[in-house]
Image (cartoon, rainbow, N blue to C red):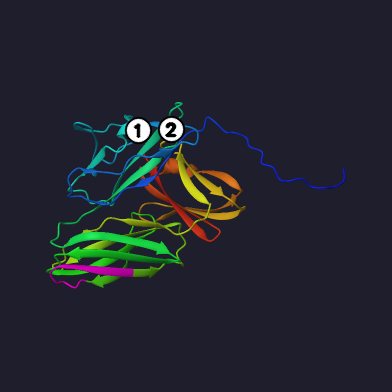
Amino acid sequence: NSGKTSNVATYTIPVTALAPLTTTILNTSLSVTAAATPISSLAATDGDGSISSYAIASLPAAASGVLYLCNSTCNPVTVGQTIMAADASKLQFDPAATFTGLYAAFNYSSTDNTGKIGNQALYTIPLFQGVTLPVHLINFTGNHAQQKTILNWTAENEENFSYYGVERSLDGIHFNRVGTVQAISESGSRTYQFEEITGALNSTKIYYRLQLVDRDGSNAYSRILSFNLTTSSTALTVLLNSGTQPVLRLTAKNEGTASLVLLDNNGRLLEKKSISVNTGNNLYPITAASQWSSGIYLAQLTFENITYTQRIAIRH
């Protein structure tokens, strides 16, 4: 009653029975001529428990290759198959040598120790049509700091080798050439470096790979490196609550207006609109997706001058 103010206390409301959050995964790129190769583990997080298993909701297109689960033997994965958490790192993918597309993809979900089922997430395996070159890429590393990306690599056996094409992507699938580094083309190993200022890019993540080009035009690709461009607490995820009805979830710390752009896999504009953003979680059903054919689509949401990109898989 004297008007004095007390200390600030924390009031905590425990939240339990949370569904797990299945992780969207972009695997390292594979050549279509590669043999069956282990891929990155399925992954999910659970705020109040642990992950017990995963379920395969869809398979890569048959023309792109075959997904296997390998324990003592390797067997093709089937739609609806349950994969225990202990086996989540035992998947392999065998690309089809005749495949000419950019990627193979499948959807999967997670289940926690209480039986709650998480969202469906997209697992993408970039593919390329390359050949085996005499040049050997010993390592390929990089870092991103202060709006600049620095790539370093070491190679050997460069006889009759021409150059390294540096390619960048904002979605991990579609790459554009941003630089060329001529090979020294001498015996022994050589180390190279490439730098790029990335401060003007409106994206939260950036991807790089090298195209290795021989003098006769033969080429192959390196693994993909990825870097986060922002530490913003804003995040965009995709909740696939059915095969044809995805929902975008934007978690934002501020209110405002965002621009949402939907594109097909060829970059063709399907829809563009402004949406209101509230503090916290915002859900945006993509109602038009029910009219889309099966395939991979891109959602690009621009908020506070940053563009967030997510891939959406539609399967009928």
Q: Are marks 1 and 2 in contact (CB under 8 Å)?
A: yes
Q: Position of residue 117 (x, y in %)?
A: 44, 31
Q: Name the element at disc 1.
A: helix
Q: Residue 85 shows which numbered tag?
A: 1
Q: Residue at x 36, y 56 (%)?
A: 226
Residue 288, compared with residue 70, is above or below; it is below
Q: Amino acid at mark 1?
A: Ala
* Residue 45 showing in the rendered view: yes
Q: Residue 282 shows which numbered tag?
A: none
Q: Name the element at disc 2.
A: loop
Q: Residues within 10 Å of mark 1 (few under 14, many from 20)?
A: many
Residue 69 in which image quadrant:
top left
The stretch of residues the image draws in magenta is 183-194
* Residue 316 showing in the rendered view: no
The residue lying toward the viewer, choosing from 206 and 87, is 87
Magenta highlight on residue 193: yes
Residue 180, compared with residue 132, is above or below; it is below
Quadrant in the picture for the C terminus = top left
Q: Residues within 10 Å of mark 2 (few under 14, many from 20)?
A: some
Q: Residue 50 shows which numbered tag?
A: 2
Q: Amino acid at mark 2?
A: Ser
Q: Residue furthest right?
A: 2
